[in-house]
């Protein structure tokens, strides 16, 4: 199993397998490094629970709804106005997109279907469902055709979905109209079909950008599926899980390159100009208003820092230091940042944190999600956070989506 550093430099095998294996690998770090968190304190345990009964029903295609586990609220402390209300778990589910505070887009395997090859591994094919969190009802959005569909990425206006057919040896990119359910295959031409949703993002409502395997190009597709080369880096490839688009839709693309300096760059599609953000930066995430960047800075082989910088890469403050950071996600208002951190053998500081972007203080929400490597995704209201954790149980890779409800 590759180390944390090695994983960030490798390009992906097919997307679904890459996501699952990356999630599983996060918790495998070893070492004696400690996590240093700027300010804040862990919440204290409390004995309280609130069971919830979410109804379960069949989707349009026969499929069992994932079981829901409501975990007790382990905390009653309030920090900077933040209180953890409850933690819900959806088993056998890959969570991905909020369609509103009460609906999410999920991926589920079909255990009754014939397994498909994803890279060199046989797995049940995945389909996409819309789940109502209030009733537990699920609606089949796309799938049930024997193929494995995944890596969904919703346009800012919610009208179109970028997704991949993960079946076979490569991921084939498509666009799905959310209203008509019309599927459009992206014409990748001579550049090859393989695209990575870990390195993709919507530039605006009508254009999605992405990178490809063993390729130094930045590409975009319009809603008709017509691909265009935006920029090409000769002799280098885009680092896995490094490409991000500016949240404001101004056409900026952030991405890392496979060079020895771990260089991070920004490409302005309007000016057709590339600028360097900094070095030793494996990944970053722009804030919703594009005024700040959450940056992972590599110190050495065993240490990373989570920083806040301005859009040019100038450091504003350090939030935390540890062996590895994952799942960085901004709240919709840009005031808070969710992240997970691992610290090797000093597991007391491992966990899922929320940081105040103004003060730099971090607050431990759950030590159980330290190895959840998926992006932390906030609901539109900023009161729920969704993350997926995968682990091997009896030789089987099992995914659980956790939804954390907080109040302010």
Image: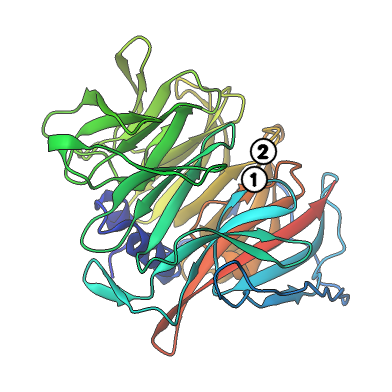
- Who's the residue at 45% across and 25% down the image? 313
Quarter of the image where one finds residue 214 = top left
Residue 29 position, x and y percent, is: 40, 67
Residue nearest the viewer, comparing 34 with 350: 350
Left or right? Give the position of 28 relative to 116.
Answer: right
Whether residue 35 is visible to the viewer of this picture, yes or no, is: no
Give the total of numbered labels: 2
Residue highlighted by disc 2: 360
Quick one: 335 or 148, which is closer to the camera?
A: 148
Residue 129, x across and y down, in percent: 56, 60
Q: Looking at the image, is mark 1 or mark 2 earlier in the sequence?
A: 1
Q: What x and y, as percent, mark residue 60?
A: 59, 66
Residue 165 vs 307, above or below: the answer is below
Quarter of the image where one finds residue 120: bottom left
Q: Can you name the residue that lies furthest to the top here? A: 271
Q: Is residue 377 visible?
A: yes
Quick check: 58 above or below 140? below
**Residue 353 position (above or below residue 392):** above
| Rendered location of residue 384, percent (x, y) | 73, 52
Residue at which label 1 appears: 38
Label 1, secondary structure: give it: loop
């Amino acid at each position: 199993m590759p180390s944390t550093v090695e994983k960030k430099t490798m390009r992906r095998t097919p997307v679904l397998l890459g996501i699952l294996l990356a999630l599983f690998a996060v918790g495998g770090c070893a070492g004696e490094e400690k996590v240093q968190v700027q300010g804040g304190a862990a919440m204290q345990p409390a004995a309280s629970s609130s069971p919830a009964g979410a109804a379960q029903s069949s989707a349009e295609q026969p499929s069992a709804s994932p079981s829901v586990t409501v975990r007790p609220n382990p905390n009653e402390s309030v920090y900077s106005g933040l209180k953890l209300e409850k933690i819900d778990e959806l088993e056998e589910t890959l969570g991905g997109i909020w369609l509103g505070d009460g609906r999410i887009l999920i991926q589920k395997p079909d255990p009754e279907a014939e397994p498909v090859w994803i890279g060199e591994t046989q797995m049940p094919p995945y389909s996409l469902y819309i789940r109502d969190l209030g009733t537990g009802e699920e609606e089949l959005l796309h799938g049930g055709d024997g193929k494995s569909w995944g890596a969904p990425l919703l346009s800012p206006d919610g009208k179109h979905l970028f997704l991949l057919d993960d079946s076979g040896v490569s991921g084939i990119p498509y666009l799905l109209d959310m209203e008509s359910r019309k599927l459009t295959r992206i014409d990748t031409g001579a550049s090859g079909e393989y695209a990575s949703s870990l390195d993709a993002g919507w530039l605006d409502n009508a254009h999605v950008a992405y990178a490809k395997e063993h390729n130094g190009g930045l590409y975009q597709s319009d809603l008709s599926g017509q691909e265009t080369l935006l920029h090409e880096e000769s002799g280098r490839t885009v680092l896995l899980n490094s490409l991000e688009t500016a949240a404001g839709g101004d056409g900026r693309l952030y991405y890392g390159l496979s060079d020895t300096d771990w260089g991070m760059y920004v490409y302005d599609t309007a000016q057709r100009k590339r600028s360097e953000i900094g070095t030793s930066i494996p990944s970053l995430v722009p804030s919703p208003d594009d005024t700040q960047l959450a940056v992972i800075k590599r110190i050495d082989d065993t240490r990373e820092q989570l920083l806040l910088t301005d859009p040019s890469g100038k450091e504003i403050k350090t939030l935390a230091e540890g062996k590895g950071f994952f799942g960085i996600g901004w709240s919709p208002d840009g005031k808070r940042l969710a992240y997970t951190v691992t610290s090797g053998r000093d597991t007391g500081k491992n966990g899922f944190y929320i940081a105040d972007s103004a003060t730099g203080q971090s607050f431990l929400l759950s030590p159980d999600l330290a190895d959840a490597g998926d992006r932390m995704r906030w609901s539109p209201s900023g009161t729920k956070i969704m993350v997926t954790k995968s682990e091997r149980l009896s030789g089987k890779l099992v995914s659980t989506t956790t939804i954390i409800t907080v109040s302010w």
